[in-house]
């Protein structure tokens, strides 16, 4: 994912890796745009993992963050598709009034 985010970093979107946000650590985050990207492995598909992710996502959203989740396999096999989804989210976040 870090390599997939390079074009965004080159375009002045300073994604950070393993960044603390409240009680959580986000895999990747653009703090200025309040955009979190999580890359999930198989443990997140288990009932306990899904429940924890749901609570975490709800908390992040309550703090104004948009949360994107990708499976490891998607990142590895369809990087361009992941980049497109991220690009759309970046444009949405840029359009918000607090970024103007």
Image (tube, helix red, strand yellow):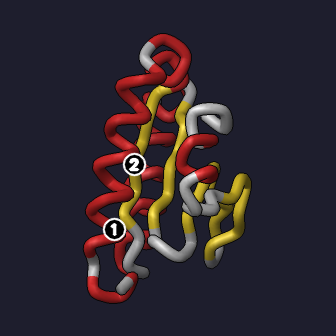
Specify which label sits upstream in the sequence, 1 or 2. Answer: 2
Residue at (57% x, 33% y) in the render: 4
Residue 92: x, y in percent?
27, 63
| Residue that protrudes farthest toward the front in the picture | 11
Along the line of sight, which residue is nearer the eye, 46 or 38?
A: 38
Q: Quadrant of the N terminus?
A: top right
Q: Give the tally of numbered discs.
A: 2
Residue name at image x 43 percent, y 72 percent: 59
**Circle 1 residues within 10 Å: few <14, some 14–19, many ≥20:** some
Labelled pair 1, 2 in contact (Cβ < 8 Å): no
User: Where residue 50 sits in the image (x, y, percent)?
Assistant: 42, 42
Is residue 88 rendered to the left or right of residue 23?
A: left
32 up-or-down from 37: above or below: below
> In the drawing, what numbered circle is on residue 54?
none
Residue 45 drawn at (x, y percent): 44, 29
Q: Is residue 42 above or below residue 69?
A: above
Please name the residue shown 37% across and 46% down the image: 87
Say which residue label 1 marks.
93
The quadrant the C terminus occupies is: bottom left
Query: In the figure, 44 relative to 51: above or below?
Result: above
Neighbours of disc 2 within 10 Å: few (<14), some (14-19), many (20+): some
Q: Quadrant of residue 13?
A: bottom right
User: Of tags 1 and 2, which is closer to the observer?
Assistant: 1
Tag of residue 68: 2
- Give how far apart the Cα atoms at labels 1 and 2 are: 12 Å
Secondary structure beneath disc 2? strand
Of 56 and 98, the residue lying toward us: 98
Q: Position of residue 11 (x, y in %)?
A: 54, 55
Label 1 element class: helix
């Amino acid at each position: 994912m870090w390599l997939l985010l390079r074009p965004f970093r080159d375009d002045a979107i300073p994604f950070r890796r393993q960044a603390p946000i409240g009680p959580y650590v986000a895999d990747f985050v653009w703090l200025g745009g309040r955009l979190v990207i999580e890359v999930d492995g198989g443990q997140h598909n288990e009932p306990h993992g899904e429940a924890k992710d749901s609570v975490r996502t709800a908390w992040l959203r309550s703090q104004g963050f948009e949360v994107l989740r990708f499976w490891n396999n998607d990142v590895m096999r369809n990087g361009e598709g992941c980049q497109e989804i991220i690009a759309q989210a970046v444009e949405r976040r840029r359009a918000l009034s607090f970024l103007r």
